[in-house]
Image (tube, rainbow, N blue to C red):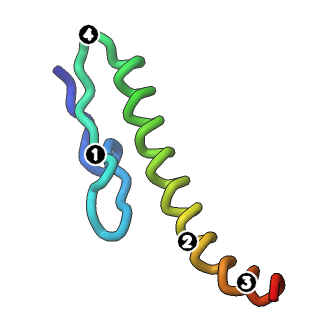
Amino acid sequence: SFKSPSNASSLLLNGTRDCAFHVEARYPAILFKQQLTACLEKIFGLIRDNVKKDILPMLSLCIQ
């Protein structure tokens, strides 16, 4: 199996390596795509949650 250097294979989120991955030599493209998808889903989830948290108070004031 092949392991990339930690600075190339991990993405730092909140000071931790939440998206670190280990690529198997047999199907590296498929595994890379799966890991990339998982990281992007996590990042967009964090962005969505933060935007909701910021917008909901203003939205409720507009509705009232």
Determine the CA span between mark 4 and mark 1.
Answer: 19 Å
Please provide percent x and percent y for residue 11: 37, 53
The answer to whether mark 4 and mark 1 are in CB contact below 8 A is: no
Q: Which residue position is annotated with label 3?
A: 60
Q: Which residue corresponds to the image point at 35% horizontal and 45% vertical from the top-left?
A: 8
- Which residue is under mark 1? 20
Q: Which amino acid does label 2 sit on?
A: Asn
Residue 45, compared with residue 38, is above or below; it is below
Q: Which of marks 1 and 2 is nearer the N terminus?
A: 1
Marks 1 and 2: CB-CB under 8 Å?
A: no
Instruction: Relative to 55, say whether 26 is above or below.
Output: above
Residue 42 vs residue 62, the one in the foreground:
62
Q: Name the residue under label 2.
A: 50
- Tell me the element at label 4: loop
Q: Nearer the viewer, mark 1 or mark 3?
A: 3
Answer with mark 3 or mark 2, whichever residue precedes in sequence.
2
Residue type at mark 4 is: Arg
